[in-house]
Amino acid sequence: MSVSLTLESVSASYGATRVLKDLSLDVTKGELVSLLGASGCGKTTTLRVVAGFLQPTDGTITLGDRDLTRLPAHARNIGLVFQTYALFPHLTVRDNVAFGLKQRGVAAAERTKRANAMISRVGLDGFADRYPGNLSGGQRQRVALARALVIDPPLLMFDEPLSNLDAKLRVDMRVEIRRLQRANGTTAVYVTHDQEEAFSISDRVAIMDKGRIMQLDRPEVLYAQPANMFVANFVGFDNMIRMEVTGDDGTTVRATTESGATVALPKVRLEPPARRFVLAARPEGLRVEAAANAIGIPATVNLRTYLGRAYQYVCDTEMGSLTANGPLSSPMEPGTAVTIVPEPDHCCALPREEL
């Protein structure tokens, strides 16, 4: 069974501290949405409110046609996977997986059958009679996942489930979580602070800050087309250049920086949202060229770093420091006068008011 989840104008507080502020979110049936952000942004509080561990001060929460807003946690029938696994150390793998079924009154023979089938689905054949203390971290996380899935919940929620695993195992487990979630068609909310993890596992990602969703979209849209300065900075647009449009011939916009440097931007790939705007670029979105190029931002190389695929330069300009890439074929020494030229396919134009 899979249903949609809707949060409408939800606010929540810890004592006098307001953590969520009129937050609205729709997760469609069978979709996996990640809540992504730094510590304190409200992502775990959102999970706690949906799970019933914290009561909202305002707003409503619905799961399918059920209003969860005031239901106690045990009545919500939500599958939860925690960072700390939360397994019972005195129970075998089989009994841990079957625990939720036992709580729901499923007969012993049936819950054993369903627990064994789910243990097999998560790749733990042969481990059913072991205890959590005899399992690796990855195996314990598979048990936690099996326990959440076996009750066939309408909603599955993950609270930073891979934080305690090493890097390679995190990659393996996020693939496994995505495979099982898709196979079951279960609606899911996934909380993480890891951008790569969120982008790789999700249908959509909500980037959060100060109890609000700053942008909710597909990972590839967030990565290439952030909606505002906060999201742009969060997803790696390290260079923020204030500009003003000074010319437009229909196909190309000419824009000038605050220091008077001019750049040319083809409109088919990057069109400013207003006369005054911010050009946001990752290092690969700015190209370092010889100083003879007249269309670009004059700069001086301060630091050069070898990346393998390119050289990366920290350059001094009249507007401050910019980080840009250059080809391996022509390395430039610190102190060299250069021109920085935008690569429109790797930049975005944002409203100036967002600064």
Image (cartoon, rainbow, N blue to C red):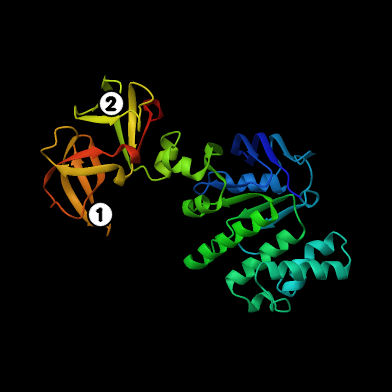
- Name the residue beneath numbered marker 1: 310
> Which one is in front, 91 or 243?
243
Q: Is residue 66 left or right of residue 137?
A: right
Find residue 211 and name its label.
none
Name the quadrant containing residue 241. top left
Specify few, some or many for label 1: CA neighbours under 10 Å numbering under 14, 14-19, or 20 or more: some
> Which one is in front, 355 or 142?
142
Disc 1 residue type?
Ala
Residue 345 against residue 190 in the figure, above or below: above
- Residue drawn at the location 30% of the way across and 21% of the way down: 250
Residue 63 against residue 259 in the figure, above or below: below
Q: Is residue 170 left or right of residue 179?
A: left
Is the C terminus in the top left, top right, bottom left or bottom right quadrant?
top left
Q: Is residue 86 visible?
A: no
Q: Position of residue 218 (x, y in %)?
A: 52, 42
Q: Position of residue 240 (x, y in %)?
A: 32, 36
Mark positioned earlier in the residue sequence (2 or 1) = 2
Specify few, some or many for label 2: CA neighbours under 10 Å numbering under 14, 14-19, or 20 or more: some
- Name the residue beneath numbered marker 2: 252
Secondary element type, mark 2: strand
Disc 2 residue type?
Thr
Q: For the residues carrying marks 2 and 1, which lies nearer the camera in this image? A: 2
Q: Position of residue 93 (x, y in %)?
A: 72, 73
- Residue drawn at the location 63% of the way across and 76% of the way down: 135
